[in-house]
Image: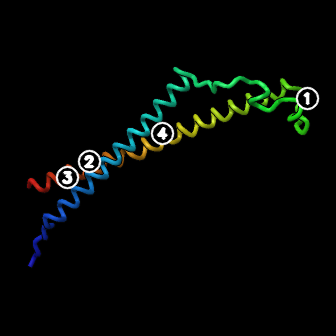
Amino acid sequence: MAEAKKKPSNFVKVLRALYFYVVSAICVIVFIIGSVTLIKTALEAWVFPVTDGYSYDQSIYSCGPESMKGMSFANKDECVTYYKDQAETQNNNQRNRDLAFGVAMTVVSFPLWLAHLWMVKLDKKKDNE
């Protein structure tokens, strides 16, 4: 005899639907966070360039005569140039980290959201049959 497929109980159906809706909501939130990060990074890079707001003087970078004794700088200008380059490198590195973070969040969360949404639709279609 062929066994009829056993239908899941209402509790299992509700639990399954709850799981898919919760994961879908989390994926949407993660996608929004990633998208906002990408938009913020793009705006900071091209529309509103971020300036660190510091003046490049000896008080900020410790390029005074006393603090340069152990350093390999010939003069204060080399010291200031070095610290300016360091600050620019750090800003570029932070921008790259933000881009990687935003891309990873959007690329991972969007397909997961679509897959879970598709599963919800399949479950509803099965319930209606």
Q: Amino acid at mark 4?
A: Gly
- Distance from disc 3 to disc 4, alpha carbons, whole Å, reads 30 Å
Q: Residues within 10 Å of mark 2 (few under 14, many from 20)?
A: some
| Between marks 3 and 4 in the image, the one whose residue lies nearer the viewer | 4
Identify the residue position indicated by label 4 in the image.
Answer: 102
Q: Nearer the viewer, mark 2 or mark 4?
A: 4
Q: In x, y percent, where is residue 51?
A: 62, 24
Residue ID at (79%, 27%): 58
Q: Callout 2: helix, strand or loop?
A: helix
The amino acid marked with disc number 3 is Leu
Distance from Cα at disc 2 to Cα at disc 4: 22 Å
Secondary element at image label 1: loop
Which residue is denoted by mark 3 in the rendering?
122
Sequence-first disc among 4 and 1: 1
Q: Which residue is mark 1?
A: 74
43 or 58, nearer to the observer: 58
**Numbered label attached to residue 39:** none
Label number found at residue 117: 2
Which is more N-terminal, label 1 or label 2? 1
Quarter of the image that includes the C terminus: bottom left
Quadrant of residue 73 in the image?
A: top right
Determine the CA span between mark 3 and mark 2: 9 Å
Residue type beneath disc 2:
Leu
Colour scheme employed for the rendering of this structure? rainbow
- SS under mark 3: helix
Q: Residue at the spot x=24%, y=52% of the render?
A: 119
